[in-house]
C-alpha cells in the first residue's frame, strides 16, 4: 500500500531534526516512522507491510522526499525493528548472495554491520545488515531493513550516492525518529 503522494514536509522542519540530533554532516538522511500513521492502515497504529513512513535526503544542493517503510513486513518472533536514533551507513550492495552479487544500496558503516534493534517478543539486541534498499510492489520486502517504494528507488540511490560523492562523505548519517517526536 502506497500513499497518494510523497511526504510533504518543509526542509526547515527536517533540518531542525538534524540540528536537534547534533548532526553536522553536509548530506544526511532522515526517516520518520509513522509519517502516514493516521491516514493509512489502522488509525493510531504503526502498521507493517505498507509504505506509511518517509525518508528525506538533505544536502546544501538537494532536498528530496520518498515513500518508505521502516518496519519489517510482518510480525514474527525475533524479527528486527531498527531503533530510533542516528545510524551511520555506507555505500554497498543489497542481496550479495543473489546471482550478480546484488544491487547498489546502503549498508551499516561499521565492521560488524550491527545496529541496535528491538526484536518482536524478545526485547533489545543488535541486528546485522539492517540495510536501506529497494522494496517491492506487493510487499515492503523487509526483515528489518529500511525500504523504499521500488519506482522511487533509482532516483533515491542515485541522489544519495551523487550527494555523498559531491560532499566527499564516505558515510551518511540516517536519523530515524518516531512520528510523535518529529
Image (cartoon, grey):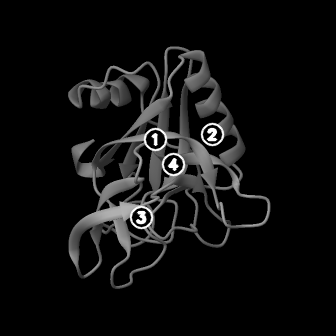
> SS class of the residue under badge 1?
strand
- Circles 1, 3 touching at the beta carbon (< 8 Å): no
Q: Which residue is mark 2?
A: 156
- In the image, is residue 92 above or below residue 10? below
Mark 1 → mark 2, Cα distance in angstroms: 14 Å
Residue 116 on image: x %, y %: 28, 57
Q: Nearer the viewer, residue 36 or 175?
A: 175
Front residue of 113/17: it is 113
Q: CA distance from mark 4 to mark 2?
A: 15 Å
- Tell me whether the residue at label 1 lies in contact with that at label 4, contact meaning CB atoms closer than 8 angstroms: yes
**C-alpha distance separating marks 1 and 3:** 17 Å
Label located before the other in sequence (1 or 3): 3
- Kind of element beneath mark 4: strand
Residue 89, numbered circle: 1
> Closer to us: mark 1 or mark 3?
1
Q: Secondary structure at mark 2?
A: helix
Residue 53 or 133: which is nearer the viewer? 133
* Dot 4 alpha-carbon crowd within 10 angstroms: few under 14, some 14 to 19, many 20 or more: many
Q: Alpha carbon of mark 1 to alpha carbon of mark 4: how far?
A: 5 Å
Q: Earlier in the sequence, mark 1 or mark 2?
A: 1
Q: Which residue is mark 3?
A: 71
Say whether disc 4 or disc 2 marks the residue closer to the N-terminus.
4
* Residue 19: % across, % down: 26, 24
Amino acid at each position: 500500500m502506497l500513499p497518494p503522494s510523497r511526504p510533504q514536509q518543509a526542509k526547515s522542519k527536517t533540518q531542525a531534526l538534524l540540528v536537534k540530533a547534533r548532526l553536522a554532516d553536509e548530506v544526511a538522511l532522515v526517516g520518520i516512522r509513522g509519517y502516514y500513521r493516521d491516514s493509512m492502515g489502522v488509525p493510531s497504529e504503526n502498521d507493517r507491510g505498507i509504505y506509511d513512513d518517509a525518508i528525506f535526503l538533505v544536502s546544501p544542493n538537494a532536498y528530496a522526499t520518498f515513500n518508505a517503510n521502516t518496519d519489517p513486513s510482518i510480525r514474527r518472533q525475533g524479527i528486527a525493528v531498527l531503533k530510533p536514533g542516528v545510524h551511520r551507513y555506507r555505500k554497498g550492495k543489497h542481496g550479495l548472495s543473489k546471482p550478480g552479487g546484488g544491487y547498489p544500496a546502503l549498508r551499516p558503516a561499521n565492521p560488524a554491520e550491527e545496529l541496535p534493534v528491538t526484536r518482536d517478543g524478545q526485547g533489545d539486541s543488535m541486528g546485522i545488515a539492517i540495510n536501506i534498499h529497494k522494496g517491492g510492489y506487493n510487499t515492503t520486502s523487509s526483515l528489518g531493513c529500511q525500504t523504499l517504494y521500488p519506482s522511487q528507488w533509482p532516483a533515491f540511490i542515485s541522489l544519495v550516492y551523487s550527494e555523498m560523492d559531491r560532499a566527499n562523505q564516505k558515510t551518511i548519517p540516517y536519523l530515524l525518529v518516531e512520528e510523535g517526536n518529529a
